[in-house]
Image: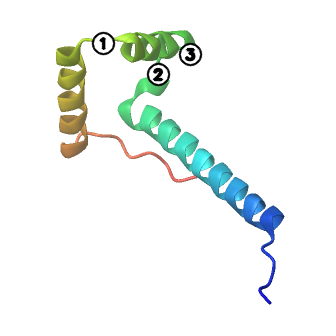
Amino acid sequence: MRKPRDFDAELKALEDKARELKTRKVQQLGELVLTTGADQLSTEELAGALVAIAETKDAAKREAWAKRGAMFFESGSRRVASAS
């Protein structure tokens, strides 16, 4: 006879993993804001810029931003975020 699966334990493990991934994503986004210097902007300015970017459907603009971001990370000019 097979041992029954503990669905509650499996579900809890999946929920814990999802929570860990979400926490890591939030931390990485915060580090990105600090590294780019965007922490100098007001909350409203940063939110407005992000909303404008998210709403942009122009593929050429998005590609240009992606290239600029890649160049930023490839250059040595980025600030080092303090470890928390």
* Residue that label 2 marks: 40
Residue at disc 1, secondary structure: loop
Answer with the quarter of the image where residue 62 lies.
top left
Residue at disc 2, secondary structure: helix
* Residue that label 3 marks: 43
**Display coloring:** rainbow
The answer to whether residue 63 is left or right of residue 17 is left
- Contact (Cβ within 8 Å) of mark 3 with mark 2: no
Residue 74: x and y, percent? Answer: 19, 45
Q: Is residue 44 above or below residue 26?
A: above
Residue at 36% in and 32% down: 36
Q: Residue 28's mark?
A: none
The answer to whether residue 45 is left or right of residue 63 is right
* Residue that label 1 marks: 57
Residue furthest out toward the bottom: 1
Q: How many marks?
A: 3
User: What kind of residue is marked 1?
Assistant: Lys
User: What kind of residue is marked 3?
Assistant: Thr
Q: Nearer the viewer, mark 3 or mark 2?
A: 3
Q: Is residue 83 above or below residue 29?
A: below
The answer to whether residue 21 is left or right of residue 32 is right
